[in-house]
Structures are given as C-alpha cells and as structure tokens.
Amino acid sequence: NYAVATGLLLYAGITDWLDGFLAHKYQMTSILGTILDPAADKALVGTLVITLTIQRLLPFLLAIVIVGCDLLLSLSAFYIRHTSLPLPVSTPHHPHVSSTQLDGHRKTFQRYWDFLIPSAEVRPTTISKVNTALQLVLMGSTTISPLLPGMAVGFGLYLEYLQWTVAMTTIWSGLSYIFLKDAIHILSNAHQLRGPLSSL
C-alpha cells in the first residue's frame, strides 16, 4: 500500500527533524545520540532501499551503492568502537589492580555495548547531512511514484536525475568520513587510531 507507506515515511521524516530541532534548541544532545540518530536514519533508508528495489522501483546498482557504503561505514564504526574502548584502570573493589591485569576485560561484550563508557563521538559531515536528506527525498519520491500515473514521463525523468545525484552524494559522503579528520573524535587519548581509518 503505497499511500500508507508514503504517510509513514512522511511521519518518520517530521519526527526525525523535530527530534533534532528540540535536541539542539534545548541543548539535549549526547554522545549516544550522535551514534543512534544517524544509525536510525541509515536503518530507515536501508529498509526502504531494499524494499523498493525488490519492487523494481529502484535500480539494483543504486541499491548496491547505498547499502554497500552504509555497510562499510557500519563495519568501520564497529572497528573504531572496539579499538577506542578505554581501558579500565581500576575498580572500586580492586583499586590496586593494574591496567595490565585488567586488559583482558576491556573488550568484553558488556563493555562494548555499554554506552555509559563513550569512546568516540560521531560528527556528521556537511555532505553526509545533504546526502541523507537527498536519500530520503528519493525514497519518498519513489514510494509515491506509483500513485502518480498521470505524471509518469516527467516524474520518471526527475527520478532518474535524482538517482544519479544520490549515487554521487552517497560515494562522496562515504569518502568524507575517510579523509576528514574531524568526522570522528576519539575520546580516549590512550587508544588513538592511526592511519586513514582514524577518520571513518
């Protein structure tokens, strides 16, 4: 049901914008939010891309570009989290335990997913914000396209140009996280990453 899908997508877009607006207006931003907010956007776009591609409304190659870039960025984020997770120097019950003795416990599953132990802050690049907006516009336009049969020719041309634009901005956005040093801020000074991956 494309009408229902369009309505739900519009609702998701409005609530996402409202969430970001209120967070910035009332200074309610958090490190966890810098991770979850783009992750939620990627999950929404990824779900729509796969669904619309199955319905043959999106080109398969474009889906590969979008999902592939998101997958690579997600894997990089997991790697950065694993590498930058700070070492527990001591505990209240064992204050004299050395960091070397605790090294084996620093990368446990529980600590990895404990966001009260922040290790990196995601700083979305300008092109990534533009790319996310364009991706959502493309998803919305594609979702509503079956409801506009009378505008098939003109709307189809618009979608084709938009698809090419999104393909380019998606690649550009992914590269920006590799080459821009301020995209990811490592909070732990003890575990600085080296090389190009430090900017993913």
Image: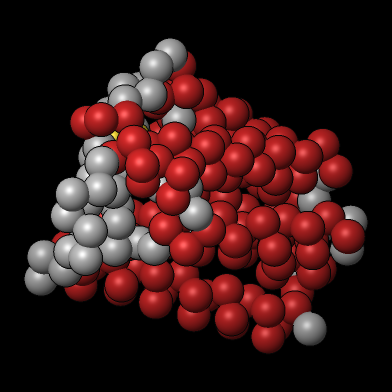
> In the displayed structure, does residue 167 sit left or right of residue 125?
right
Q: Quadrant of the C terminus?
A: top left
* Residue under the image location 43 percent in, 14 percent down: 195
Is residue 177 positioned above or below 37 on the image?
A: above
Image x and y of residue 196, in percent:
45, 16
Camera-side residue: 173 or 145? Answer: 173
Camera-side residue: 199 or 63? Answer: 199
Camera-side residue: 124 or 82? Answer: 82
Image x and y of residue 153, in percent:
79, 51
Image x and y of residue 135, in percent:
57, 50
Please indicate, yes or no, whether residue 176 appears anywhere in the rendered image: no
> In the displayed structure, does residue 128 sit left or right of residue 116?
right
* Residue under the image location 23 percent in, 58 percent down: 94
Report which quarter residue 80 is drawn in.
Answer: top left
Report which quarter residue 53 is drawn in.
Answer: bottom right
Camera-side residue: 95 or 129? Answer: 95
Please indicate, yes or no, whether residue 200 appears anywhere in the rendered image: yes
